[in-house]
Image: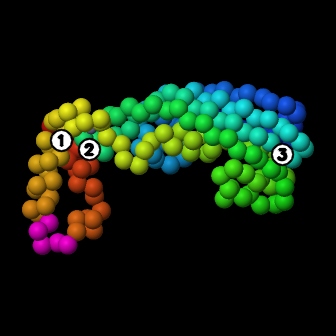
């Protein structure tokens, strides 16, 4: 956990305050496992207290993350250059994070942990599908291995409607085999 990202909102003076920290891969994988293998991200959170109960957050994340390529599973470095701005209002007893632009937090909260917001902001930098620019940039050995395993799998599963029921992604099986060699 990153203590710097826990804002003491109740006692925060009016005006703008900057919080800075550096994140590595443990920040992304501590709470729940993600695809992030390595991370090197500088974060700045500018928090402005506008009134007793309203705040403005400006989150800026710059750096890079390493995730597996969808095609060859080898390391793929992605730049992180993301910003997220939102208003926070402290009122009532319930947390309401259903609105992207306005976060409502219970009035009794003394602290607001911005870690989940920072985490989501960085993960925005990872597109739904992410591959090396072209197949030539992929790990050729890995592609060969994956291809041969795919053929095997298709053959093995001739009688079955879908291999999904086995619960194991054939690509990870192939990766495991490759690492054991
Ligand atoms: Zn690749």
Our reading of the magenta stretch's main secondary structure is loop
User: Which residue appears at 14% of the width and 58% of the height?
Assistant: 153
Q: Which mark is residue 54?
A: 3
Using the image as rendered, state which of residue 104 and residue 6 is in the foreground: 104
User: Which residue appears at 27% of the width and 65% of the height?
Assistant: 164
Snapshot colouring:
rainbow
Q: Is mark 1 within 8 Å of ligand 1?
A: yes
Q: Can you identify the residue that label 1 sits on?
A: 143
Q: Can you identify the residue that label 2 sits on?
A: 71
Q: In screen coordinates, is 73 left or right of 5?
A: left
> Is there any visible trace of residue 78 in the rendered image?
yes
Image quadrant containing the C terminus: top left
SS for tag 2? loop
Which of discs 1 and 3 lies nearer the camera? The answer is 3
Residue count near mark 2 (Cα–Cα under 10 Å), binned few <14, some 14–19, many ≥20:
some
User: Which residue appears at 11% of the width and 63% of the height?
Assistant: 156
CB-based contact (under 8 Å), mark 2 and mark 1: yes
Q: Is mark 2 within 8 Å of ligand 1?
A: yes
User: Which segment is the magenta one?
Assistant: 157-161
């Amino acid at each position: 956990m990153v203590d710097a990202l826990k804002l003491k909102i109740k006692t925060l003076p009016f005006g703008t305050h900057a919080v800075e920290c550096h994140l590595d891969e443990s920040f992304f994988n501590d709470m729940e496992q993600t695809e992030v293998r390595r991370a090197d991200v500088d974060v700045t959170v500018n928090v402005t207290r506008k009134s007793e109960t309203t705040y403005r957050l400006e989150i800026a994340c710059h750096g890079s993350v390493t995730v597996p390529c969808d095609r060859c599973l080898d390391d793929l470095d992605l730049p992180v250059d993301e910003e997220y701005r939102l208003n926070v209002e402290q009122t009532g007893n319930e947390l309401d994070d259903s609105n992207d632009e306005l976060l409502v937090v219970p009035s009794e909260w003394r602290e607001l942990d911005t870690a989940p917001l920072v985490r989501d902001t960085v993960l925005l930098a990872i597109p739904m599908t992410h591959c090396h620019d072209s197949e030539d940039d992929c790990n050729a050995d890995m592609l060969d291995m994956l291809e041969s395993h795919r053929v095997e799998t298709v053959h093995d599963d001739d009688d079955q409607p879908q291999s999904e029921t086995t619960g194991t992604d054939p690509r990870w099986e192939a990766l495991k085999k490759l690492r054991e060699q």
